[in-house]
């Protein structure tokens, strides 16, 4: 294996580990939130309000940042030197600051005008109140993105992967402290939570600014917005957002439809998405984060063969990890949701509603995991329009399916339609990319996927059998016993899958086994 591939695997491992910690702390925050608020209407309003800055964070980190800023900054470092790259970063930072402040001014004027002239229902008024408190978080996210882009370009991935943990810690601390020790209403508690989210953003900004400062970069605003580099960046903004962030846009659309449908739909969508993002974020998103700078440097050297090799290895690795995770989480969805969330305000009915949404989404998680890698490969051959066009088509198609499914099948149709769109999105990108790059081992990838699917189903059967064996005492047992039983079943499933994949000579299992032996 080449040094480049080893570096990719090493960096992906570290980012995946920190992403895992982020997801664990995020899971704790969701457990706490479910306990105190369940699927209540006020939690629907908060989730809908928080989705706006949160979707912006995802769009910036997965779209603008990784697909527009990093390639240009990396190219400037290699071709024109550090000073020109720093100048470009300062221009982007100044532009983001100006846009963010302008957004705040317009937003507050519009919201105050609406509240003063229109009589809103209680949930809509909650939404506007929460959004008013959260609005400054948008400016903070814009400023964070530039520093994170520099760190990505310098192939420093650990600090950016760590920063979401700060948000989760602040979130949990506020809810537990306020609900346990202060006599506050739900609205007051959630207002304080919104303020703590903004505070966590300031702490995150400091955490990413310090390592950038140590690298020798100066990021004071530069009001001179001239030059080809900034023009190139602004021309890439829309294609970058659409190309890389279709899943986030689709999930945002789901929440919009859900909020205006019935009580608890937005909340159940929220919890199911949080669970779905476990397999997505632990490996797939980590891999795509590491790959973009690698692809950027390769494209500069016109190393098309290397792009194909990395693409083949990456897709096989994603399928090897995500497919069994998807199967395992689907067959264990009810006990997982019960153990994590079913307490306090989160009832058994809430468990069933969240499980239904979760199963609807999980049908597309495998394909959504592979999409960022395929999009990055398009960018490596200087093609941003094709992913944008495919992304726009899938986004509007999802909107049509959301409307139809909501009318015909109820709220569950929102999750199912988004899952189905993931398959179409993946296939469109794969077919066109193969025609653009030539064959990059698609038959080998499909053969490996078939084996992985077969082994995952076998593992899923074992997991179902083990779950039935312990089910007779599962719900009467204490929480720690329930958790132990579930973890034991999951561990057994992992062992079964790894043993089967090794016996069936799946390449990734042998690579993992050799890596473990080398570490010893």
Image: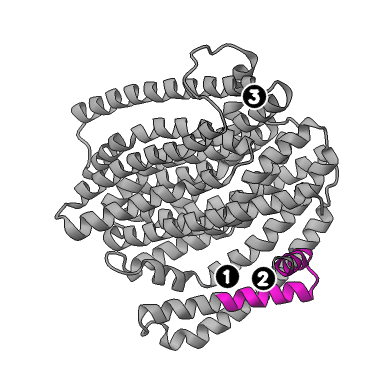
Label whose residue precedes the other's in the sequence (3 or 1): 3
Q: CA distance from mark 3 to mark 2?
A: 48 Å
Q: CA distance from mark 1 to mark 2?
A: 8 Å
Is 46 placed left or right of 11 in the picture?
A: left
Label whose residue precedes the other's in the sequence (1 or 2): 1
Q: Which residues are magenta?
A: 491-517
Q: Magenta stretch: residue 232 in it?
A: no
Q: Residues within 10 Å of mark 1 (few under 14, many from 20)?
A: many
Q: CA distance from mark 3 to mark 1?
A: 47 Å
Q: Is residue 241 above or below residue 34?
A: above
Closer to us: mark 3 or mark 1? 3
Q: Residues within 10 Å of mark 2 (few under 14, many from 20)?
A: many
Closer to us: mark 3 or mark 2? 3
Secondary structure under tag 2 reads helix
Is 73 placed left or right of 208 in the picture?
A: right
Percent x, y of residue 511: 76, 64
Quarter of the picture containing the N terminus is bottom right
Q: Is residue 161 above or below residue 478?
A: above
Q: Which residue is mark 2?
A: 456
């Amino acid at each position: 294996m080449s040094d480049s591939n080893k570096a990719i695997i090493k960096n992906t491992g570290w980012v995946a580990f920190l992403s895992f910690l982020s997801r664990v702390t995020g899971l704790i925050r969701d457990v706490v939130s479910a306990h105190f608020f369940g699927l209540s209407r006020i939690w629907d309003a908060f989730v809908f309000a928080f989705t706006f800055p949160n979707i912006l964070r995802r769009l910036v980190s997965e779209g603008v940042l990784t697909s527009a800023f990093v390639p240009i900054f990396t190219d400037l470092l290699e071709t024109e030197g550090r000073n020109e790259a720093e100048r470009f970063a300062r221009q982007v930072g100044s532009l983001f600051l100006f846009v963010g402040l302008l957004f705040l001014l317009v937003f507050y004027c519009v919201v105050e005008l609406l509240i003063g002239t229109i009589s809103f229902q209680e949930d809509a008024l909650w939404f506007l109140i929460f959004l008013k408190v959260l609005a400054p978080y948008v400016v903070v996210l814009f400023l964070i993105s530039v520093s994170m882009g520099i760190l990505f370009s310098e192939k420093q991935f650990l600090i950016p992967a760590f920063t979401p943990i700060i948000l989760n810690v602040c979130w949990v601390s506020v809810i537990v402290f306020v609900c346990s020790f202060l006599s506050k209403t739900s609205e007051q508690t959630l207002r304080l939570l919104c303020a703590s989210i903004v505070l966590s953003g300031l702490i995150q900004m400091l955490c990413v600014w310090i390592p950038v400062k140590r690298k020798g970069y100066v990021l004071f605003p530069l009001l001179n917005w001239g030059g080809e580099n900034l023009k190139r960046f602004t021309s890439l903004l829309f294609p970058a957002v659409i190309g890389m962030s279709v899943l986030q846009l689709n999930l945002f659309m789901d929440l919009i439809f859900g909020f205006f449908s019935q009580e608890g739909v937005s909340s159940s969508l929220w919890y199911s998405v949080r669970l779905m993002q476990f397999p997505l974020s632990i490996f797939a998103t980590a891999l795509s984060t590491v790959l973009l700078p690698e692809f950027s440097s390769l494209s500069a050297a016109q190393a098309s063969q290397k792009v194909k090799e990395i693409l083949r290895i990456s897709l096989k690795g994603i399928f090897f990890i995500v497919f069994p995770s998807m199967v395992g989480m689907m067959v264990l969805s009810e006990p997982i949701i019960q153990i994590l969330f079913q307490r306090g305000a989160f009832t058994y009915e809430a468990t069933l509603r969240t499980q239904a949404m979760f199963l609807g989404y999980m049908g597309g998680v495998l394909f959504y995991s592979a999409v960022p890698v395929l999009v990055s490969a398009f960018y490596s051959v200087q093609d941003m329009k094709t992913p944008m066009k495919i992304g726009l088509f899938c986004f509007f198609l999802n909107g049509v399916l959301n409307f139809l499914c909501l009318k015909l099948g109820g709220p569950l149709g929102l999750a199912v339609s988004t899952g189905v769109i993931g398959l179409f999105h993946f296939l469109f990108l794969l077919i066109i990319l193969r025609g653009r790059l030539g064959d990059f081992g698609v038959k080998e990838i499909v053969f490996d996927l078939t084996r992985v699917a077969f082994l995952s189903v076998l593992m899923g059967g074992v997991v179902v059998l083990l779950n039935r064996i312990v089910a007779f005492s599962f719900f009467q047992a204490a929480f720690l016993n329930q958790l132990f039983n579930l973890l034991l079943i999951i561990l057994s499933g992992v062992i079964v899958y790894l043993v089967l994949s090794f016996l069936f000579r799946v390449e990734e299992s042998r690579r993992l086994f050799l890596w473990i032996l080398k570490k010893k």
